[in-house]
Image: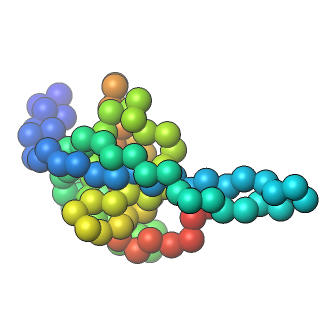
Amino acid sequence: MAYEYTRENNLRDSVCTLIKKNVALDDDGVPVENEPTKTEVFCRVGSIYEKEFYDAMQAGIKAQYKVVVFAGDYHDEKVVEMEGNTYSVYRRYYTGDNIELYLRSDVETWN
């Protein structure tokens, strides 16, 4: 339990923008991308732990940050904008009322 307590102390308060891709069907049933939905939320930002960093590297992922947001604000967004940089979410972990989003710096094609 002490480990979990110390994990939360390394986070700093910030603001980030959650970005969700909007896809609609046109009259012929062909998917058309609309303007993405951007939601600015309060978050707590921390660095990736060494084990998480190396596990991600083995999977070919360049891990950057852990961002904790209120779970009610998160609606399955795949991209996070923070401090002028864009990151993609490669892993989520729910912790009570919050969700930990693990971010990578190499933003690729959205699924």
Give residue 6's position: percent from left, percent from top. Answer: 10, 38
Give residue 70's position: percent from left, percent from top. Answer: 33, 33
Q: How is the image coloured?
A: rainbow
Question: For the point 40% across and 74% down, which residue is it?
Answer: 106
Image-based side of 22 in relation to 25, left or right: left
In the rendered image, which quarter is residue 82 located in? bottom left
Q: Is residue 53 visible?
A: no
Q: Is residue 32 above or below residue 71?
A: below
Question: For the point 28% across and 51% down, which residue is it?
Answer: 16
Residue lying farthest to the top in this orientation: 96
In the rendered image, which quarter is residue 107 located in? bottom left
Q: Is residue 84 visible?
A: yes
Question: For the point 14% across and 44% down, which residue is it?
Answer: 13
Residue lying farthest to the right in this orientation: 28
Q: Is residue 37 above or below residue 60?
A: above
Pick the front one: 70 or 101: 70
Q: Is residue 90 above or below residue 42?
A: below
